[in-house]
Image (spheres, rainbow, N blue to C red):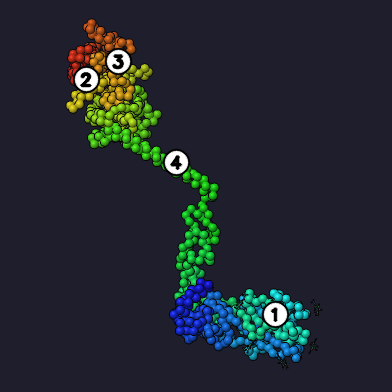
Amino acid sequence: MPTAFLLMALLLAAAAASATAEAAGSLVVTHGCGMSCGGVVIPYPFGIGGGCFRKGFEIECVNNGRPVLAGTSIQVVHLSADPAESLVLLPVGWMCYNASNPSKAADFSYAETEMNKDGVYRISNTHNELVVLGCNTMAYTASGKTEGGGAAYPYAYYTGCMSYCNDSASARDGLCAGVGCCRVDIPPGLTGNYFEFHAYNHSTMMDYSPCDYAFLVDRNNYTFRRSDLLMDTNRTSPVWLDWAIRGDVLSCTQAAKTGQSACVSAHSDCVDSTNGPGYNCKCSKGYDGNAYLADGCTNIDECAHPVKYPCYGVCKDTQGSYQCTCHPGYESDDPRTEQCVPKFPLAAQISTGAIGGALVIAFTAFVIIIRKEKRKTKEFYEKNGGLTLEKAKVIKLFKKEELKPVLKISNLIGKGGFGEVYKGVVDDILVAVKKPISGNVLENKQFANKVIIQSQVIHKNIVRLIGCCLEVDTPMLVYEFISKGSLHDILHRVDNKEPLNLDVRLSIVAESAHGLAYMHSQAHTKILHGDVKPANILLDDSFVPKISDFGISRLIAIDKEHTANVIGDMTYMDPVYLQTGLLTEKSDVYSFGVVILEVISRKKATHSDNNSLVTSFLECHKEKKKATELFDKEIATTGNLELLDTLAGIAVGCLNLDVDQRPSMTDVVARLLTLNRSRMV
Ligand SMILES: *[C@@H]1O[C@H](CO)[C@@H](O)[C@H](O)[C@H]1NC(C)=O
Ligand SMILES: *[C@@H]1O[C@H](CO)[C@@H](O)[C@H](O)[C@H]1NC(C)=O
Ligand SMILES: *[C@@H]1O[C@H](CO)[C@@H](O)[C@H](O)[C@H]1NC(C)=O
Ligand SMILES: *[C@@H]1O[C@H](CO)[C@@H](O)[C@H](O)[C@H]1NC(C)=O
Ligand SMILES: *[C@@H]1O[C@H](CO)[C@@H](O)[C@H](O)[C@H]1NC(C)=O
């Protein structure tokens, strides 16, 4: 493990610094039995010194820090716990000839080693190969000596190859294929280093190939050179050894049975050896370290090693594993192996971006507009005396939004010079919203005061002001909705004319008078209507009249529509007022007189015909004539004529051009009351 190696090297470096007494490169013991020798890290089960190694894995640190397999001169180059491997330098087998007798081997070495006394090693068949050099020779390795068995040959394994050279130029560098050099794979199970040679007459090749060689070697390490045909017989060769926990226990199953497994670490697994009997220990997936040591296996922080443990998203280490998720808005079938891609395709992303951008702009604009609107709303509210009215707490102050649903063209029930009237439901009450044409020039104080005054006018014959909306240029007024419409409509509707008996007419006149009288009698501020006419007398389902369109309602209408000296309808207008320009309660009385005439005649008074209706009645009265033919046929029955005459008399009184002779509304009410009583009797 490169990580483990690095870590160990660091530890060693630190330890080495403190262990100055030791000779450079000599044995350095770090904490516990973690140790190294000559730069070679020695992991358990390997170890130097008593208690630090498992049986068969002892290492000696000789001379100037040369680690060797204990009891041998075999140098150790590398040791590792997982994979269970050792790299060692093994001697080369050879056979040499003497020019004095070139047909017979003068000297040789089997290169046999006593490296595997405890049988823990196997020559790695995967990492090594057998190489034979020479001209000409045949060599082989033999292994697995069968002691005293009845086998035909003394070894369990024989494997080798033949090398022949036609002449001195035959062998070629880099080519180990039977000419000067041959090589062969080896089987698993080889336990040692041992070579035998067949001797060949070397008389013709003594100058370029006096010796033959055979050796095991890291298959990635050796490349043939023609010069190697003359190489040093002392040469060693790097060979990988597989090691395993062997001995009596030959497999993981057996180890488990004994309960004495060498795999002592938590998060470790036992695996059977693939090269010979026995088993090895490995840290479980997601763990790293030495499985042969207690607590040797530790969690791997996979996120710290993105090359080994890739994650294309957000990496999060967990015990024994790691989580890898894509960033929000990204996805991947497996972010450990596949790039996270945006959930939307690029085109969609771009368009989303564009739409998003547009939205942001639109939203910003919207916010600006809303802010401006809000500021304007507040300005209007204040201009229209909102603060004063707020304090007064006399009527409801509607928000613009609350009235919005009412102000639909389908709800429009009236339209004129004053503006528009809409019918709708607000706060579960049927209302009429009067929306004046904008351009109101009222001072806020004036408006607020009028509202306060009007809000105090609560009478069953006066249309009630429920509230208003001040958040617009010209305030909108919210009234109770009066179902039947105006007296004008009831009286003069062309088609579908409703019958109106005398009782009803009398009641309408009397109660309207009540309403007007109440207005005129207001203790603090006398309210003058200024535009009394049938169109401004509304009727509910029971024909109860309600005076409307006065006070602020009129104020607003006047201010925007008419020039100051033209108030109301000329048809009903007091000629005295027209002359003086001074509106008094008697002006309303005059107008009411005209209303009475309309009610009893069911004829429309019109200014354009010099007010013929009024003049007709006045003339009759002047001439002390009965106005029988002027009365509406429906009510002008014999029994009613007297009463109608009296009623006409009251009306004429109201129309008196001498203001002082005119009765007050209270007088009118009293007279009508008397009339009604006389009728009851
Ligand atoms: C070769 O043999 C001769 C005579 O036996 C001997 O003197 C000589 O040392 C030998 N050479 C080698 C290299 O062994
Ligand atoms: C083999 O060796 C002989 C004698 O040295 C030489 O004449 C011949 O050309 C060689 N053959 C090849 C194929 O190298
Ligand atoms: C060895 O080869 C040489 C040259 O070919 C020959 O003269 C000699 O007799 C051979 N020796 C034996 C023992 O065959
Ligand atoms: C072969 O192994 C030796 C000893 O371990 C080493 O020094 C050398 O660099 C290796 N050569 C190659 C080509 O790997
Ligand atoms: C080979 O090794 C032996 C013993 O270790 C030594 O005496 C001899 O000089 C060595 N030969 C060479 C060529 O190094």
Q: Give the label, 1 or 4, closer to the camera.
A: 1
Cα separation, mark 4 vs mark 2, equals 57 Å
Question: Residue at left 46%, top 63%?
Answer: 316
Q: Nearer the viewer, residue 528 or 74?
A: 74
Query: What element does badge 1 sit on?
Result: helix
Disc number at residue 585?
2
Cα separation, mark 4 vs mark 3, equals 55 Å
- Compared to 307, does 679 lie above or below? above
Lower position in the chain sequence, tag 2 or tag 3: 3
Residue type at tag 2: Glu
Residue type at tag 4: Ala
Residue carrying label 4? 362
Residue type at tag 1: Ser
Residue type at tag 3: Thr
Lower position in the chain sequence, tag 4 or tag 2: 4
Lower position in the chain sequence, tag 1 or tag 3: 1
Marks 1 and 3 close (CB-CB < 8 Å): no
Residue carrying label 3? 571
